[in-house]
Structures are given as C-alpha cells and as structure tokens.
Image: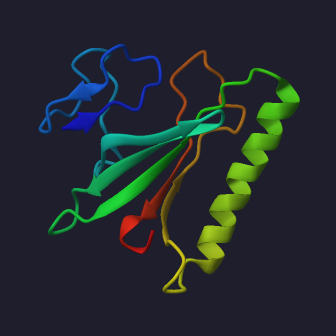
Amino acid sequence: MSYCLNPDCPKPQNPAAKKFCQYCGTKLLLREHYRAVKLIGQDGFGRTFLAVDQDKPGQPRCVIKQFYPQSQGTNIVQKAAMLFAQEAARLDELGKHPQIPALLANLASPPECRRTSITLWALIILASRI
C-alpha cells in the first residue's frame, strides 16, 4: 500500500505500485524512492508515516516525519518550523551514534508551509534505530 502525503487528500490509501495518488494526483514517491505506507501518528504540528526506501535491496523501513501545523497563528507556525529545523540539525549531528536515529534526508520546502499549494517539509529517518 502507498499512503498519499497530501493532507487534503480525501482517500490517501493507494495500491502499492502506484506512482501518483489515484484520488488527488499527488506524487507518492519522495525523491523517487521513499514511499509512505502507513500513517503511524499525528499531532498539532505534523504527521509521521512508516515508509520504505524502494531504492535499496530489501526495501528497508524508514520514517517520514511531515511538518504540517494545524494552527494558523504566524508566531506558532514560525516557532514550530524552527523546532522542526532544529530537530533535523540535531539528528544530522547525532545520528551517527548507534542509539540515535539517523537522518537519511531533509526534504525542505519553505518553513512558512503555506497551504495554498501542497507543501512538503519532511525528515526521513532510518527506522531500524528508532
């Protein structure tokens, strides 16, 4: 199964082999090889997905953490964006340690994350160390 990362998609679950969401047309592969397969959590600032890296043999699991603030207050969104960016920086610095998740990619759109278009700002984290 593939899970559409467009927060406004009415039916985000798609067959595994699809490259585009069959309901909203959003691309299902991040950087052409990370595929979200299941929503595993969400809060007021984002969503977390179990994913696979289709570019590697065995398709190892990883996690996609998507920045998606629910609050519309400018100060709140700016603070959340700053914290999200700090998390990426910390994971990049510390992710070489065997007890800390490794940052595989930081897919950054502008931190304002305007909802006028589908904006994705995501961290992709190696799941085997989570």
Query: Relative to 17, does residue 50 appear above or below in the rendering?
Result: below
Q: Position of residue 99 (x, y in %)?
A: 52, 82
Identity of the residue drawn at 58% across and 46% down: 108
In this rendering, would 58 be left or right of 42? left
Identity of the residue drawn at 31% across and 24% down: 12
Q: Quadrant of residue 71?
A: top right
State which quarter of the image contains the N terminus. Answer: top left
Query: Relative to 102, does residue 83 appear above or below in the rendering?
Result: above
State which quarter of the image contains the C terminus. Answer: bottom left
Q: Position of residue 17 (x, y in %)?
A: 12, 38
Q: Nearer the viewer, residue 3 or 115?
A: 3
Q: Residue furthest right?
A: 75
In this rendering, would 90 be left or right of 8? right
Colouring = rainbow
Q: Position of residue 112 (x, y in %)?
A: 72, 32
Q: Position of residue 50 (x, y in %)?
A: 35, 50
All told, the count of numbered labels is: 0
Q: Nearer the viewer, residue 32 or 66?
A: 66
In this rendering, would 99 be left or right of 32? right
Identity of the residue drawn at 53% across and 37% down: 42
